[in-house]
Image (cartoon, grey):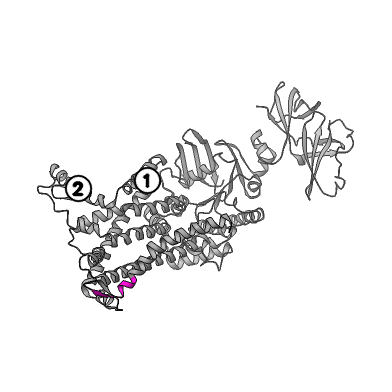
Amino acid sequence: MTEKSFFRRSAIGIVFFWITLFVLIPNLLVIICSFLERDPAHFIRFVFSTESYRNLFAAVFFRIFLNSFKNAFIATLVCLLLSYPFAILLCRVRPSLRRYLLVLIIIPFWTSSLIRTYALVILLKGNGILNSLLMGAGLIREPLQILYSDFAVFCGLVYTLLPFMILPLYGNIEKLDIRMVEAAFDLGASRMQTFFRIILPLTMPGIIAGSILVFLPALGLFYIPDILGGAKSMLIGNFIRDQFLTARDWPFGAAASVILTAVMGFMLLAYYYSLKRFNAKLME
Amino acid sequence: MTQVVVRLENIAKHYDDQIAVENLHLDIFAGEFLTLLGPSGCGKTTILRLIAGFEMPDSGNIFIGGVRVNDLAPNQRDVNTVFQSYALFPHMDVFDNVAFGLKIRGLKNREVFTRVTEVLEMVRLKGLEKRSVTQLSGGQQQRVAFARAVVNEPLVLLLDEPLSALDYRLRKEMQLELKRYQRKLGITFIFVTHDQEEAMTMSDRIIVMNQGRAEQVGTPKEIYEEPVNLFVANFIGEINIFDGFVVEIGSERLSTRMEGHMFHLLNRRGFQPGRKIRILLRPEDIQVHKTRPADYFPSLEGQVEELIYKGSTVDLQIRLASGKSVYVTEFFNEYAEDIFYSRGQQVWLRWFDGWEVILPDD
């Protein structure tokens, strides 16, 4: 064996081993677990069963599922509406300022998002900074009940996931050929027409990529609804955690995990194919 | 007199400290093919963008169809542009690209269809309506870009080096094609190029630009045969430039010393004695003799240094006694069957009286 091929094999081998150990095996365990029976004493009993999946289609779980999707969808939409103008702005400011703004977007990644979520509590709570400011300004008399509401959950989700929307959008909008916009103007299009007929379709890959990067984590980030929503609204992330840690129904939690993973997988697949079609259209 | 469709009045435009256009006055007439010709950075594209509305002039007025358009946005001006790299919309097929302007104007689907089909037929793209523009060849993309602009029947069509991305053969073809469309449609074309040959082929009038100024405005013939200054003379075609000095003037002619001989040339510009001048001769205006011509008109003696056979012509590089190189082009025709020379051969150069251009030596 030559030295080069040894290097190649070991480099691939280590990563392969790592992924097998920490990604493939745990996922396989979850899938296997979801097809087993519950045992109060030993968590699981090694008997094949599809009961967990059948239970998933019960009304309660379905509502949780829908509610999670609704929340994630709204969070994604808010992120998109906030990020798009900002990404355009990023592309239009002078380069020195742009670098500074990009660093500002990345800085939050230096702190654990769990800690940042607790920081939001301090901001939003009854005698917190936001309420103090509003009362100090004379806008409100009594502190608003912001914390432990859906609003607080959205604040947390949008705050945590905003960079994941901005960065792909920025990457896409920056590549947008300014002459496309000029050509549209030249052909008589107004600003609105140019935006909806040219800019929006051409930045669709960025919109889709950003939406997936926000939507999927928004489904699973269980600690944000927990901490900011006061564990009142049951979301799919919390539900799965509760099945494992509180209800001790491992097969049921595993089944919910598998369904969630499958849904995410389908969405990624759809994204992959739509992007491939889009690129094929652009690049050929 | 023909009607003025675009008038540029005292236009000036700066980018930071850089002068892009300086004090430009220009009338563009209905139905003409006008070319802005010049080296890169001479301001020709800026003029196009000023007319289209993508740039605002620092001073001066722009009129299109008699209306001052300084404050009108590009989408409100009755001009369309064929962009240098076409700027086709990659997410639309050929039909939708061409139909874009008409749909924006709110035309009925049936009329959009009729007009787009008509234009696509003209540019020979019928049958490719549903093709994605990214799957087209360079020449086809060029035609789509052209069709997308002319389908709107603008008052003026602006073309920003539309052929520069095409290979030589295709460019030649498209030059003639564009010229044909222009005649057929009767639309005023303002064409930007740095290629003097392209400008000569297509234009009714050429504006030679340099550093934001119009050096000369005229028909291709005027610009080629009577360049007003050395920049124009050098930029358009090959030219030989000789230094001279006016010794004395007669009633019509001046006497100048040039390459060690005294020449008596027509004094069209009224040069005074003592003036340093440049005498300009096109390579094809020079005649080559194998023996010293025996008349009073002096000839320049030299040796053939280089011979370049070009098929329809033979180009000679001749070294004069002074050491100066002169380029001469000889055409094959029935009178010049004997235009083959050998390297090092002694020759004498002359030209027809009055074919030279004399410019002041600035």
The residue type indicated by label 1 comes to: Leu
Of the two numbered discs 1 and 2 on the same chain, state the one appearing first in sequence.
Answer: 1
- Label drawn at residue A123: 2
The residue type indicated by label 2 comes to: Leu
Question: Looking at the image, which residue is at 33% across and 58% down?
Answer: A214
Quarter holding the N terminus of chain B is: top right
One can see residue A151 in this view: no
Question: Looking at the image, which residue is at 37% across and 68% down?
Answer: A266
Label 1 marks a residue whose chain is A
Give the percent coordinates (x, y) of residue B122: 57, 63
Give the percent coordinates (x, y) of residue B319: 81, 34
Q: Quadrant of residue B322?
A: top right
Give the extent of the magenta segment: A31-40
Say whether residue B141 is left or right of residue A229.
Answer: right
Image position of B255 with respect to A136: above or below? above
Cα–Cα gap, marks 1 and 2? 24 Å
- Please give the count of numbered marks on the rendered protein: 2
Task: Residue A39: say if magenta.
Answer: yes
- Label drawn at residue A102: 1
Q: Quadrant of residue A81?
A: bottom left
Say whether residue A67 is left or right of residue B81.
Answer: left
Quarter holding the C terminus of chain B is: top right
Image position of A87 with respect to A42: above or below? above
Question: Looking at the image, which residue is at 73% across and 29% down?
Answer: B267
Q: Residues within 10 Å of mark 2 (few under 14, many from 20)?
A: some
Give the percent coordinates (x, y) of residue B155: 50, 52
SS at circle 2: helix
